[in-house]
Image (cartoon, helix red, strand yellow):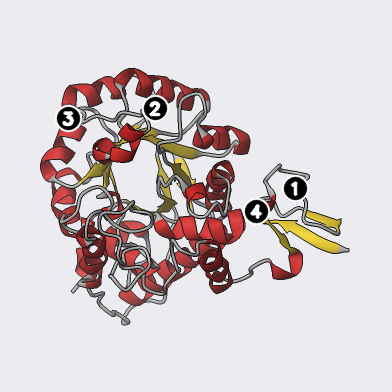
């Protein structure tokens, strides 16, 4: 008799063959493991992700979009997968922009343990890092169902003391939306981010999010260039300031504008009533040859810090990278590719393990740079 464990809810089941689904939470058997093989460390989670994502992502120690990586190698002109758009310059630019920044080692001062807690739109978080609005994980080798992926990110982030944003892609519809189903099923705070669909469709989706009690809702404005959406009869559009204002006014929920890379766009969104400006180039997946997000973040922060909440993503792999983004002016930082790998590696358990590791390294980085709270972090720790 084998003891099987669900890596979504941790229920154990005794039987000869792997169960078809979890007897408690209903997750399918792709996230049910022999209890003796359930990962306990981040490396073990990544090892499983490497196997489950074979052909898509090798979970390299350095996720940088270079041409020696499977996601980008010989990928020009092919579907993006885990890689970046075009030749991957934007993907690599995100990583390079953060690598170019150094942290000041400051060790003289009172001995104080860093405090990373913060509040996002009224929800207390243990640290200022959230799961980004990724989607489509089931298409990477069918290693996890889409709804279980969404549930894993929501539950795993919550278990780590933070929150997940949920994404949108070509096989999501208002009638069949894995992200919204997962939010309803889990009953935990999560933020749905939708592609820039037609206004009437977005208003319908926003109402659905409102009914679920989501803390906020948003639109991936940079998704307007998605060709895969159009090919699957899911048209997307550029949004004017008038369009954005209309969406803001369509709900009482705080509105997030994601995919902002210029001061001009950021100011326009703020003027339209957006509460959160998310500085992002979609992980380098929508337009090649953009700057890294860490390059444009300081100018946007100088213009809008304190007026709106600013989040940033792109190239963030470690707690050190998180600290750099916060020092550049972000209020919160989002993780994308690593959350997919973590969920595929070990469901919500993998996501929790990864997020807890990020918090651990962030605390260490804060301690060694002489900052004690998140609000103390500024550009003075960079060199």
Residue placed under numbered mark 1 in the picture: 20
Q: CA distance from mark 2 to mark 3?
A: 17 Å
Q: Are marks 4 and 2 in contact (CB under 8 Å)?
A: no
Reading the chain from its start, which is encountered first: label 1 or label 2?
1
Residue placed under numbered mark 2 in the picture: 253
Residue 272 seen in the figure: yes
**Up/down of 69 relative to 251, above or below:** below
Reading the chain from its start, which is encountered first: label 4 or label 2?
4
**Residue at coordinates 44% horizontally, 51% vertically from top-left?**
131
4 or 2: mark nearer the eye = 4
User: Residue 271: which disc?
Assistant: 3
Image x and y of residue 175, in percent: 50, 24
Residue placed under numbered mark 4 in the picture: 30
3 or 1: mark nearer the eye = 1
Q: Nearer the viewer, residue 285 or 262?
A: 285
Indicate the secondary structure of the residue bearing disc 1.
loop
Image x and y of residue 31, in percent: 65, 54
Q: Nearer the viewer, residue 152 or 322?
A: 152
């Amino acid at each position: 008799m084998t003891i099987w464990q669900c890596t979504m809810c941790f229920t154990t089941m005794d039987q000869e063959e792997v169960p078809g689904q979890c007897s408690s939470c209903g997750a399918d058997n792709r996230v049910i493991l022999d209890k003796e093989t359930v990962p306990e460390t981040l490396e073990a989670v990544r090892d499983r992700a490497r196997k489950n994502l074979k052909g898509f992502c090798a979970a390299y120690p350095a996720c940088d979009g270079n041409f020696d990586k499977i996601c980008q190698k010989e990928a020009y002109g092919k579907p993006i997968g885990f890689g970046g758009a075009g030749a991957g310059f934007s993907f690599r630019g995100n990583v390079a922009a953060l690598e170019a920044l150094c942290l000041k080692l400051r060790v003289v001062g009172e001995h104080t343990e860093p405090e990373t807690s913060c509040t996002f739109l009224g929800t207390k978080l243990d640290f200022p890092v959230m799961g980004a609005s990724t989607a489509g994980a089931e298409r990477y080798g069918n290693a996890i169902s889409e709804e279980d992926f969404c549930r894993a990110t929501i539950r795993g982030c919550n278990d780590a003391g933070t929150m997940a944003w949920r994404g949108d892609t070509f096989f999501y519809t208002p009638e069949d939306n894995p992200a919204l189903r997962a939010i309803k099923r889990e009953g935990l705070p999560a933020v749905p981010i939708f592609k820039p669909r037609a206004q009437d469709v977005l208003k319908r989706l926003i109402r659905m999010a409102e009914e679920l009690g989501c803390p906020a809702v948003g639109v991936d404005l940079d998704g307007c260039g998605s060709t895969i959406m159009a090919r699957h009869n899911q048209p997307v559009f550029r949004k004017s300031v008038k369009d954005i204002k209309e969406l803001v006014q369509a709900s009482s929920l705080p509105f997030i504008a994601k995919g902002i890379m210029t001061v001009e766009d950021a100011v326009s969104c703020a003027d339209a009533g957006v509460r959160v400006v998310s500085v992002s180039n979609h992980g380098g997946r929508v337009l090649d040859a953009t700057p890294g997000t860490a390059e444009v973040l300081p100018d946007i922060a100088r213009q809008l810090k304190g007026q709106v909440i600013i989040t940033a993503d792109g190239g963030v792999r470690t707690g050190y990278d998180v600290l750099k983004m916060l020092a550049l002016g972000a209020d919160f930082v989002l993780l994308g590719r690593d959350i997919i790998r973590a969920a595929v590696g070990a469901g919500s358990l993998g996501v929790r393990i990864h997020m807890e590791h990020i918090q651990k390294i962030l605390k260490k980085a804060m301690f060694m740079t002489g900052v004690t709270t998140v609000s103390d972090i500024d550009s003075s720790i960079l060199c």
